[in-house]
């Protein structure tokens, strides 16, 4: 279904029927409302005003729309933050936030939790069984604006308690964190600091990682308090929450397990490249390994990037096809009408400020007609899995060791290699079963996890092809360095070990050769591997040389080992040329590159959805006619 995000509380009630009618006229079937409306629902403590929401839901449903109702906990009313200042979050600088924006609350504050419980219960009692309300969105973009980590006194105490639960004894905590270093040993849980507390030399990375885990869990627990209420009072309704996946302070895999469907807010102008949008669609689909919703889809130009460029005709339609092809079940546009009040007046809507239809309205109406005539076939299953983990990402962020070493950039570069060739990829949590995949790539799997290494060995033994990237299996779950040959737990199977890493400062590259041929350059990071003397099937496909460090002898930055029908590969660097095909060209020969800006999504019936994201005509191989700029086309399966 297609739908839209609507704020009836921003507009006179006399306007609502016209809006509802226009929504239906465009073919929209879903409408999300209510997620920031707390001060209208409870203008004074304990005094509820349901009339307007009753009437809004009636108007929308009378027009044939189905409602996704938001819980309003991202924006508490001013009376609440004023009366209970402790519900406001404290930033890393130790300052308490103010009322006036959103997400300025603390996830562990008992007062906040209690008032959230109250408003959500009241809402659910009133609308939980309403026939028009088919789903609930919990809160809005939890953790957005970098707000998942709070440094208030309640969170400090909660973190200390969390440590006591996780480590059971201080002896354990001291041992696992290595607090012998710089005399950090704790003899009372209350001595444990927050990693935002000012110190010289930085905090122990084990403490910092523990706090990140704690903060993620605190937010998930905050969400769980609402799912519990809604499951009881809104039986049979789907529970979801909308995430902004560039935010990575919450472990979305763990959060997704708590809801029925996961949704995300897709603003392609917030990304660098159309492949990044595809990456996040696939990442969100991977959170629960099931179809997802786009709760907010960019409807035209937006207001929050540095330059807010134009959105040419056809763009909104193309973005929506892209979302559907990657597994979106519903797509809702944000927002219905450009706002006349508050912070987001420069943001477009499907209607203009003056209520006339904007470009987005016409494109969405066209799209709804097209989909009614010819529904898009489902996607073809992927045979390639990118294995990711928020805990690995956090571990890299805590000590990147090279300012440009960015976990998500590595993941997106690898993803783009496949995207450029029209190869479908699943982006899934690194501990997932890998049945059905031909190839898996573990993205910077820094943390050692015995269960994962066992699963990966079994995958390779069954004929799978596993690639480990740089910095694989180096440190334990509390960031203690391994005392084994690296990659820990897989070095023997690889028949090789990592001897050394080289962080390459800006301007210093590595030159690569494959046999006698030049094989491009790389930057940022490279490792030196040595094949074990007794290794039977290990080969080193590349040789690297560091021109800026002539006394470092040429070395092998990658090793591949055949293991029966499967293989294990360690590839410690990524190419400067994102199209070089290093990731996709193994174990099979490289698939041809698509023309620049062209995406090709394989569909289950053997056809492909072709999308030209660019402003230039392009003709992909096998296409009779060129794709015009922003053209979307289903290319039928080619006859065998
Ligand atoms: C989203 C948010 C919306 C609105 C939108 C503007 O992140 O959920 O409420 O702010 O961005 O693009
Ligand atoms: Zn707090």
Image: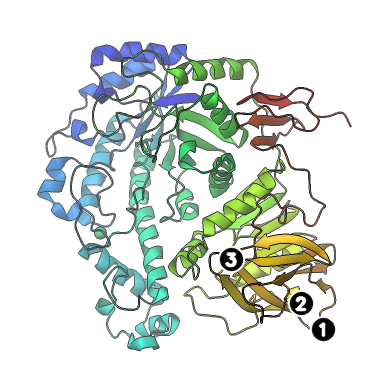
- Which is nearer the eye, 559 or 133? 559
Circle 2 is placed at which residue position? 495
Residue 265 in view in this figure: no
The local secondary structure at tag 1 comes to loop
Circle 3 is placed at which residue position? 445
What label does residue 534 carry, if any? 1
- Measure how far apart labels 3 and 2 are at the Cα level: 19 Å
Query: Which is more N-terminal, label 1 or label 2?
Result: 2
Query: Which is more N-terminal, label 1 or label 3?
Result: 3
Q: For mark 1, does the 10 Å Cα neighbourhood hold few (<14), some (14 to 19), or many (20 or more) residues?
A: few
Residue 405 screen position, x and y as percent: 52, 63
606 shown above or below 403:
above
Query: Which is more N-terminal, label 2 or label 3?
Result: 3
Q: For mark 2, does the 10 Å Cα neighbourhood hold few (<14), some (14 to 19), or many (20 or more) residues?
A: many
- Measure how far apart labels 2 and 1 are at the Cα level: 8 Å
**Identity of the residue drawn at 26% across and 79% down:** 191
Seen in the image, is 340 located left or right of residue 552?
left
Model colouring: rainbow
Residue 572 screen position, x and y as percent: 66, 67
- Ligand 2 quadrant in view: bottom left
Residue 305 screen position, x and y as percent: 39, 40
195 shown above or below 253:
below
């Amino acid at each position: 279904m297609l739908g839209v995000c609507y704020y009836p509380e921003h507009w006179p009630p006399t306007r609502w029927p016209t809006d509802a009618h226009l929504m239906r006229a465009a073919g929209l079937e879903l409408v999300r409302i209510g997620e920031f409306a707390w001060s209208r629902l409870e203008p004074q403590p304990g005094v509820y005003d349901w009339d307007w929401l009753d009437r809004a839901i009636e108007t929308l449903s009378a027009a044939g729309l189905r409602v996704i109702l938001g819980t309003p906990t991202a924006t508490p009313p001013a009376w609440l933050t004023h009366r209970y200042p402790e519900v406001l979050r404290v930033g890393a600088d130790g300052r308490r936030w103010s009322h006036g924006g959103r997400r300025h609350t603390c996830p562990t504050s008992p007062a906040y939790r209690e008032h959230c419980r109250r408003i959500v219960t009241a809402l659910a009692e009133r609308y939980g069984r309403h026939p028009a309300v088919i789903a609930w969105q919990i809160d809005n973009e939890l953790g957005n604006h970098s707000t998942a980590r709070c440094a208030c006194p309640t969170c400090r105490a909660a973190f200390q308690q969390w440590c006591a639960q996780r480590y059971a004894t201080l002896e354990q905590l001291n041992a696992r964190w290595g607090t012998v270093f710089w005399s950090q040993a704790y003899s009372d849980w209350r001595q444990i600091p927050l990693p935002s507390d000012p110190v010289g030399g930085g905090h122990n990375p084990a403490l910092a990682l523990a706090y990140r885990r704690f903060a993620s869990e605190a937010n998930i627990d905050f969400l769980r308090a609402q799912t519990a209420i809604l499951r009881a009072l809104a039986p049979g309704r789907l529970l979801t929450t909308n995430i902004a996946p560039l935010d990575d302070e919450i472990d979305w895999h763990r959060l997704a397990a708590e809801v029925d469907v996961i949704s995300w807010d897709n603003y392609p102008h917030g990304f660098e490249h159309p492949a990044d949008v595809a990456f996040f669609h696939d990442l969100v689909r991977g959170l629960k390994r099931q179809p997802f919703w786009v709760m907010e889809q960019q409807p035209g130009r937006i207001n929050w990037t540095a330059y807010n460029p134009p959105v040419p005709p056809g763009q909104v339609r193309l973005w929506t096809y892209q979302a559907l092809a990657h597994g979106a079940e519903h797509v809702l546009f944000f927002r219905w009408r450009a706002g006349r009040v508050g912070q987001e007046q420069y943001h477009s809507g499907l209607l203009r400020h003056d209520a006339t239809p904007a470009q987005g309205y016409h494109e969405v109406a066209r799209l709804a007609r097209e989909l009614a005539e010819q529904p898009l076939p489902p996607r073809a299953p992927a045979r390639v899995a990118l294995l990711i983990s928020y805990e690995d990402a956090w571990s890299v962020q805590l000590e990147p060791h090279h300012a440009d070493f960015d976990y998500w950039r590595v993941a997106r570069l690898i993803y783009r290699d496949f995207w450029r060739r029209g190869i479908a990829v699943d982006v899934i949590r690194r501990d997932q079963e890998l049945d059905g995949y031909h190839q898996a790539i573990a993205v910077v799997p820094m943390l050692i996890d015995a269960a994962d290494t066992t699963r990966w060995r079994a995958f390779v033994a069954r004929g799978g092809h596993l690639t480990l990237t740089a910095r694989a299996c180096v440190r334990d779950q509390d960031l203690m360095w391994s005392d084994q040959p690296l990659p820990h737990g897989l070095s023997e199977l690889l028949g090789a070990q990592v001897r050394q890493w080289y962080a390459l400062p800006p301007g210093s590259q590595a030159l690569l050769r494959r046999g006698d041929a030049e094989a491009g350059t790389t930057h940022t990071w490279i490792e030196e591997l040595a094949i074990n003397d007794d290794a039977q099937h290990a080969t080193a496909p590349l040789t690297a040389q560091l021109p800026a460090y002539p006394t470092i002898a040429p070395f092998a930055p990658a090793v591949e080992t055949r293991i029966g029908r499967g293989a294990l590969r360690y590839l410690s660097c990524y190419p400067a040329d994102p199209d070089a095909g290093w990731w996709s060209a193994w174990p099979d020969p490289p698939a041809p590159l698509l023309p620049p800006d062209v995406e090709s999504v394989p569909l289950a019936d053997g056809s492909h959805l072709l999308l030209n994201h660019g402003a230039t005509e392009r003709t992909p191989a096998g296409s009779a006619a060129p794709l015009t700029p922003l053209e979307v086309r289903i290319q039928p399966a080619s006859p065998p």
